[in-house]
Amino acid sequence: MRFSRTLFHTVALSLVISAASLGAMAHAADKITIMVGGFEKQIYLPAKLTESLGYFKDEGLDVEILNEAAGVDAENQLLAGAVQAVVGFYDHCVDLQAKGKFVESVVQFSQAPGEVELVSNKYPDIKSFADLKGKTLGVTGLGSSTNFLTLYMAAKAGLKPGDIVTIPIGAGATFIAAIQQDTAQAGMTTEPTISRMLKTNEARILVDLRTVPLTEAALGGTYPAASLYMETSWVEAHKPEVQKLANAFVKTLHFINTHSGAEIAEKMPKDFYVGDKEGYIKALDAGKGMFTPDGVMPEDGPKTVLAVLSEFSKNVKGKQIDLSKTYTTEFVKNAK
């Protein structure tokens, strides 16, 4: 009898340990690393905001957010298998398909780039993109979305390849230094860098892509930009985790849509204000309309992106791109 009781306790203990081990494994499986192409940029606000609001934890996810200066570098980390997801521009999904790699936007954060082309006030004669002929233009990185958009607007303004030079100058302090030192005479950047340069009167806006109407005027349609994108093969193999991510981010987009810039700013790290909380809030209030309310891809958006890339990209031009494979709405439409 004593032997039976001892055996029972041993078996019961083994079952408890096994269950605990399985639970730990399940939790470990939910560990996801997301690379953001500059998480302090307001265009990528949902990444850090979701973490601050606790929505990842609410979904039982263990999410690590890593920061990379440019979207193209984040893309490279994804393709190398170092991270499971990227918060970056949707246009990478189109560009990569042209190179034979299948990546898709799972949650579409924005329907406008949230970027502007700033031009140094040392050059008062520059009134349009055509006037940038012979100038050096800053972008976050070569192969980045800012590079795509810069080359497109140059082509649209009648400039030929070689009429401008694009150089990588990042964002924030490195962007500002490049304009101040005349390394670049103009450049494409986001908030809060825009407000910082306008406040010091060192630069002015040449092209504004911060709202849907301004974007439609400049690019010919809605331009889906910031998104959560992943390799299609990973999405197919990890649908439960992807659904949890979609649930968390859709809640965040709803929060952005229903709260003021001041309320959102309170949830962000204070160093994101770069010493100007008032300016940060003002920029948020002016630009938060770029975000989608529900994470759904704008219906006409992918065609605009393809048209932009086809204008100048040797990778995309003349290629058959299946836009339906560059994004999915399955998860956002099933979000809680």
Image (cartoon, helix red, strand yellow):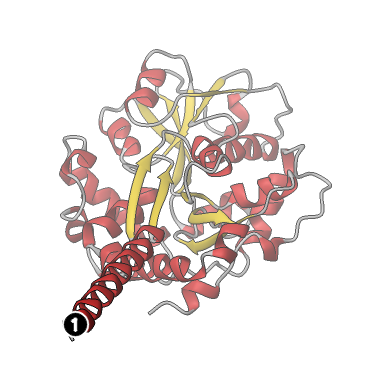
In the rendered view, would you say 131 is above or below 305? Answer: above
Q: Quadrant of the N terminus?
A: bottom left
Q: How many marks?
A: 1
Q: Nearer the viewer, residue 86 or 185?
A: 86
Q: Nearer the viewer, residue 127 or 37?
A: 37
Identify the amino acid type marked 1: Arg
Residue at 52% across, 31% down? 127
Q: Position of residue 15 (x, y in %)?
A: 30, 74
Q: Position of residue 269 (x, y in %)?
A: 19, 46
In the rendered view, would you say 326 is above or below 58? Answer: above
Left or right: 79 as drawn, with respect to 202? right
Query: Which picture quadrant has residue 20?
Result: bottom left
| Structural crowding at the residue carrying mark 1, measured as other residues with C-alpha within 10 Å and reported as few (<14), some (14–19) or many (≥20) | few
Q: Is residue 154 visible?
A: yes
Left or right: 311 as drawn, with respect to 263? right
Q: Which residue is denoted by mark 1 in the rendering? A: 5
Q: Nearer the viewer, residue 13 or 190?
A: 13
Residue at 30% across, 63% down? 56
Q: Residue furthest bottom?
A: 1
In the structure shown, which secondary structural element does the residue marked by tag 1 occupy? helix
Q: Position of residue 130 (x, y in %)?
A: 63, 31
Q: Nearer the viewer, residue 87 or 160?
A: 87
In the rendered view, would you say 88 is above or below 271? Answer: below
Q: Position of residue 252 (x, y in %)?
A: 32, 65
Residue at 32% across, 69% down? 18
Q: Quadrant of the C terminus?
A: bottom left
Residue at 49% across, 40% down? 74
Query: Which picture quadrant has residue 134?
Result: top right
